[in-house]
Image (cartoon, helix red, strand yellow):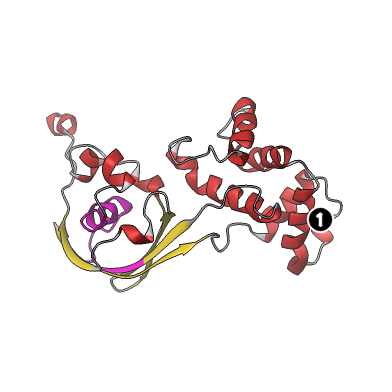
Amino acid sequence: MTYHIIINSVQTVDELKGAWTDKAIIELLDKLDFPNASDSNPEELRDLLFMAISDFEPEEAAAIILQYKLSDTLNENQIEQMSHDMLLDKISEEYADISLHHELFNINQLLYKAYNGTFPNAKATIITFEISPNKNISKEVVLKVLNKSLAGNNVIKRLFANQLAGKENFDEADDIIWDLTSNGGTGYTLTTSEYWMSKDEFNDAEFDAEVVEFEDDDEDKC
């Protein structure tokens, strides 16, 4: 199917709205041994969290937050190793499982702000666009359409060429795009890591792109 897309804006941000709810902050304050966190003024919770984090050594704070957010996914040895690697700027999108990137971004940026830059400053990309026909729009379809405009050295092009061409299944698309929200009509907002798509990697703001769907030969034989 051929889609027509108009990219209205591409923004670079260092924090995502709603990344840390009041409930999550209170729970994390408890993990950081901050007393009576649930009784705190909601407007002060963020500053209290920064203060509580900074009472720990950076690697120790990173481990506590990783344990809070990712204990169901990572074991203790992985959490310990990652807490050191985050501080040394060794956490790249290629280091960890793609499905963890969204959470790692939020954790990294919390630590970055709490320690005034001791941790590396990661960035996210937010894209607003219109696409037509507004039919079967998924994260996979959007990535295949945007591929038409992305620079040749873009990391998605390099790592997932066969998936973009419809030659292989593209399950990774669900984790590369952190969020895809309909704005009504043909409008959408996409959120991802700057690692995957940066503002300066787009060549065209309006274009047509043909999407080739992956066809599983094994399923056809069933």
Residue at image point 48% right, 35% down: 96
Q: Is residue 118 at least partly visible in the picture?
A: yes
**What residue sits right under mark 1 in the picture?**
37
Left or right relative to 183: residue 72:
right
Q: Quadrant of the N terminus?
A: bottom left
Residue at image point 22% right, 62% down: 135
User: Of residues 151 and 70, which is closer to you in this image?
Assistant: 151
Q: Is residue 170 magenta?
A: no
Picture layout, residue 78 above or below residue 126: above
* Amino acid tagged 1: Ala
Q: Quadrant of the C terminus?
A: top left
Place residue 216 in its image quadrant: top left
**Image coords of residue 166 (percent x, y):** 18, 43
Picture layout, residue 13 above or below residue 67: below
Residue at image point 18% right, 33% down: 219
Categorize mark 1 by other alpha carbons within 10 Å: few (<14), some (14-19), many (20+): some
Q: Is residue 135 magenta?
A: yes
Residue at image point 60% right, 48% down: 107
Give the magenta range.
128-150
Left or right relative to 10: residue 92:
right
Mark 1 lies on a secondary structure that is helix
Q: Is residue 132 at least partly visible in the picture?
A: no
- Which residue in the rendered view is the most extreme toward the top? 77
